[in-house]
Every structure is written in structure tokens, then in C-alpha cells.
Image (cartoon, grey):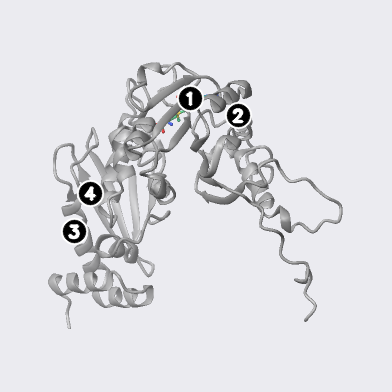
């Protein structure tokens, strides 16, 4: 029996909530070309208004069992997204057909990382950079990519929408953090949280930046949001947002800040991203997070940049954010250590109870990490083989 667009649509909608093997079998029957055609048309219809400033041509590839169906989407500001036949040289999104069908027609699976691939031709962006606004075309493209990704998501993410609205780079520009943040922060959303973010944005310009502070203020309607930057940002102060000038590498300043305005429910390090500064901020501010709260480190990629105090490879991450996380995994289990001579774990060992590491983002959960080691009568070696 041949699949018509109507019967194909019915099949996809019916299969979107099935377990993976059953969904793949339905997709085999419908066929990649027909299924991709149906789901891409649905995607176009769901795309909200284009928020990109300049025309963007984004490639959209849909893969199934090693085959791919290629499409080009054109996003012009103020117009509906449409399909086109021309080239899409600068950015391409790739989805597994099954993921896309689940995203578009399935029940909300909750936020997860890595539901799609983004490939960019950074040289193309450098060639097309405007001297006055070098990032304009890049940002326009990433906003366009975001429009498509949002349409492919089963549940519009509030935090992604707020990130785009306030021009924070936590979603769609450099990073894809917001659904992950939502996953962890949802339970705190309507609490009177105190959120401290290191790094306000906008660098030297006193009136620029503050995107993420505004995003957090909107996301946490009862929250009090604090921001720290080495440059003065007081022009951004408003109800429920307070800014402070200081360095995350200044222990004295951080201690005073914590004493006067802590404890915090959430601390986010999105400041200099210099390895030593990340260590200082963690050492001084993790103690100022309450139990049940989070300490977050963004931009882990700088651990691999010598220019940020990192190491070029994985072998020698040392005193970087990645080195800190590796040590914390050991510290989380310090009660289980079997050395006969006592070895002291790191100072946070009794209080880190969860380590959630995603690409370029780590969320550390605070609590009481004392539960007693596995009982002494559990053998520490295998004696049955
Ligand atoms: C990536 S931006 C922050 C973006 C912002 N959090 C957002 O998501 O919209 C980094 C900011 O950190 C600030 N910064 C750099 N070094 C710092 C330091 N040592 N202490 C505090 N802030 C610093 C910069 O001035 C810049 O404004």
C-alpha cells in the first residue's frame, strides 16, 4: 500500500509516542522522503516570527538509518519561513528523523541535551562580517537556527524564549543551555530565590549587558537577582536586580558580597572564564550556596585554552574548571576511599551531592554528602571467581 501525505501524517502522529523500535518500524514503512517532507512542512507552519535581523539560509538535514533528506530554509525578518532550492553555505541543522517526529508530534519528553546537531562554517561568517558590527550576521543566523529548533520542540521553553528576548547568549547564540537550566531549576521557579551571576555582559560599555540578569528576573518571579562584573553596570539596576563592581578573582570582595547578600540559592560563574578565577570564585562562593541550591560553571571550553590558563589537551587539565570537576567526582565518593593512610579530600567534599556535566556547562548540587560508606561487611574485593 502506498503512503499518501494524509496516511503518512496519521502514521507519524500515532507513532511519535511509541517506544523507539516501534517508532523506527513505522518510519521504515512511511519512508524517509515522505516522512521528512511531512514533518518539515509541519515545522515551517510552527515556526514563530523570524527574530533574525538579516536574511538567513539554514540547511536542514533529516537522517534515518544512514540516509539523509536535505532541505534549505530561508528566514527573512518579518516573513514566514519558507523552503528554497538554493545553497545554505553557513549553517546546517541535522536531526534524526525519529527525534524530530517525537519532538514535533510526541508528548513532552522534558528537556534534554543533544537532540540535534548544529554545523557552522565559521570562515563564511568571518568573510561576511560587517566591520561595524562583526557579530551581526552570525547572531542573525543563530537566531534563525533557534526559530527552527524551537518549532521542533514539543514544549516551548520559557527560558529559551526569555534568553532570546533579553539577548543573553545562553540559548541559540553561543550555547544551548536554557532547557538544561530549566530541567534543574524548575522546582525553584516560584520560590523567593537569591541568584548571583558573575559576569553581566557588555564588557566596558556601562549600559550594555544584563541580558541574563533580566532573563532570571523574569523566570523567577519571586527572585532577587545579583550581578557582578569588573566593569560598572549600575545603570542596569532595577527592581529585583542589583549589580556590583568587582572581580571574581578578589576573595575579599566575594566574601563581603556573600556575607552581605548571601546565602544564595544559585550562583552562576559566567565571568572571565579564566581558570584561576573560576577556582577562586568556587572556593569563596560555593560555601555561600544553601543546601538544595546550585553552583554553576559555564564555558568549560576555556579549560582547553592555554590563553585562559587551560591546557590544550585532555591530559593536563590541572587547576581548570574541568580539573575541578574531575576532582569533585572523586570527592563525591570520598567516604568510599579505601586508602589505609587518611587522605584529605577537597574542602567541598562533604557538600557536593550532585555533579551534572553537559557540554560547556556544569551544575553542582549542594547538600550533605555524608551517608556513611558502604558497610564494612561488603567485600572490597571479588572472591567468587
Ligand atoms: C560572557 S559575558 C557575561 C554574559 C552574561 N552572563 C549573559 O549570559 O548575558 C562576561 C562578562 O564577564 C565580565 N568579566 C570579565 N572578567 C571578570 C572578572 N574577573 N570578574 C567579574 N566579571 C568579569 C566581562 O566584563 C563581561 O561583561
> Residue 295 placed where, x, y %?
53, 40
Kind of element beneath mark 4 = strand
Pointer 1: what residue?
A: 228
Against 53, residue 358 (above or below) is below
Give the CA separation, mark 1 to mark 4.
Answer: 40 Å
Number of disc labels? 4
Circle number at residue 277: 2
Q: Are marks 3 and 4 in contact (CB under 8 Å)?
A: no
Helix, strand or loop status at disc 2: helix
Q: Nearer the viewer, mark 2 or mark 1?
A: 1
Q: Say if disc 1 is inside 8 Å of ligand 1.
A: yes
Please state the horizontal and vertical placement of residue 306, each as a whole percent of the image. Answer: 62, 33
Q: Which mark is residue 42?
A: 3
Disc 4 crowd, CA 10 A, few/some/many (<14, 14-19, 20+): many
- Among the two numbered marks 2 and 1 on one chain, the one whose residue lies closer to the N terminus: 1
User: Which of disc 2 and disc 4 is earlier in sequence?
Assistant: 4
**Nearest the camera: 14 or 61?**
14
Q: Is residue 282 left or right of residue 219?
A: right
Residue underneath mark 4: 73
Residue 371 visible to an observer of this rendering: yes
- Rendered view: 113 above or below 313: below
Pointers 2 and 1 in contact (C-beta within 8 Å): no
Does 332 sit above or below residue 9? above
In-front residue for pair 382/134: 382
Left-right relation of 371 to 269: right
Q: Secondary structure at mark 3?
A: helix
Element on which disc 1 rests: strand
- Say above or below: 154 vs 304: below
Amino acid at each position: 500500500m502506498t503512503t499518501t501525505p494524509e496516511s503518512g501524517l496519521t502514521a507519524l502522529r500515532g507513532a511519535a509516542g511509541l517506544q523507539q523500535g516501534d517508532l523506527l518500524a513505522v518510519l521504515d514503512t512511511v519512508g524517509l522522503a515522505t516522512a521528512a517532507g511531512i514533518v518539515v512542512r509541519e515545522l515551517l507552519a510552527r515556526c514563530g516570527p523570524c527574530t533574525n535581523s538579516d536574511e538567513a539560509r539554514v540547511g536542514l538535514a533529516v537522517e534515518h538509518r544512514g540516509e539523509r533528506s536535505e532541505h534549505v530554509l530561508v528566514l527573512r525578518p518579518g516573513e514566514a519561513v519558507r523552503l528554497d532550492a538554493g545553497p545554505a553555505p553557513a549553517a546546517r541543522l541535522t536531526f534524526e528523523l525519529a527525534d524530530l517526529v517525537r519532538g514535533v508530534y510526541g508528548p513532552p519528553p522534558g528537556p534534554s541535551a543533544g537532540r540535534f546537531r548544529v554545523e557552522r562554517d565559521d570562515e563564511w561568517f568571518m568573510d561576511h562580517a560587517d566591520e561595524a558590527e562583526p557579530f551581526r550576521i552570525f547572531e542573525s543566523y543563530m537566531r534563525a537556527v533557534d526559530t527552527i529548533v524551537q518549532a521542533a520542540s514539543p514544549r516551548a521553553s520559557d527560558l529559551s524564549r526569555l534568553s532570546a528576548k533579553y539577548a543573553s547568549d545562553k540559548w541559540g547564540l553561543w550555547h544551548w543551555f536554557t532547557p538544561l537550566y530549566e530541567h534543574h531549576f524548575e522546582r525553584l521557579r516560584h520560590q523567593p530565590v537569591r541568584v548571583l551571576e558573575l559576569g553581566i555582559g557588555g564588557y566596558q560599555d556601562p549600559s550594555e549587558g544584563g541580558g541574563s540578569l533580566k532573563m532570571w528576573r523574569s523566570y523567577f518571579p519571586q527572585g532577587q537577582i545579583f550581578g557582578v562584573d569588573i566593569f560598572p553596570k549600575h545603570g542596569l539596576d532595577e527592581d529585583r536586580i542589583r549589580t556590583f563592581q568587582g572581580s571574581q578573582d578578589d576573595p575579599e570582595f566575594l566574601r563581603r558580597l556573600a556575607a552581605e547578600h548571601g546565602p544564595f540559592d544559585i550562583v552562576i560563574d559566567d565571568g572571565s572564564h579564566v581558570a584561576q578565577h573560576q577556582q577562586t570564585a568556587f572556593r569563596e562562593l560555593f560555601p555561600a550556596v544553601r543546601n538544595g541550591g546550585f553552583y554553576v560553571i559555564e564555558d568549560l571550553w576555556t579549560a582547553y585554552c592555554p590563553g585562559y590558563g587551560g591546557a590544550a589537551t585532555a591530559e593536563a587539565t590541572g587547576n581548570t574548571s574541568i580539573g575541578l570537576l574531575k576532582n569533585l567526582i572523586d570527592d563525591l565518593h570520598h567516604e568510599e576511599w579505601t586508602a589505609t593512610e587518611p587522605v584529605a579530600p577537597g574542602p567541598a567534599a562533604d557538600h557536593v551531592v550532585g555533579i551534572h556535566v553537559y557540554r560547556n556547562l556544569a551544575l553542582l548540587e549542594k547538600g550533605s554528602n555524608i551517608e556513611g560508606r558502604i558497610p564494612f561487611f561488603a567485600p572490597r574485593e571479588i572472591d567468587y571467581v
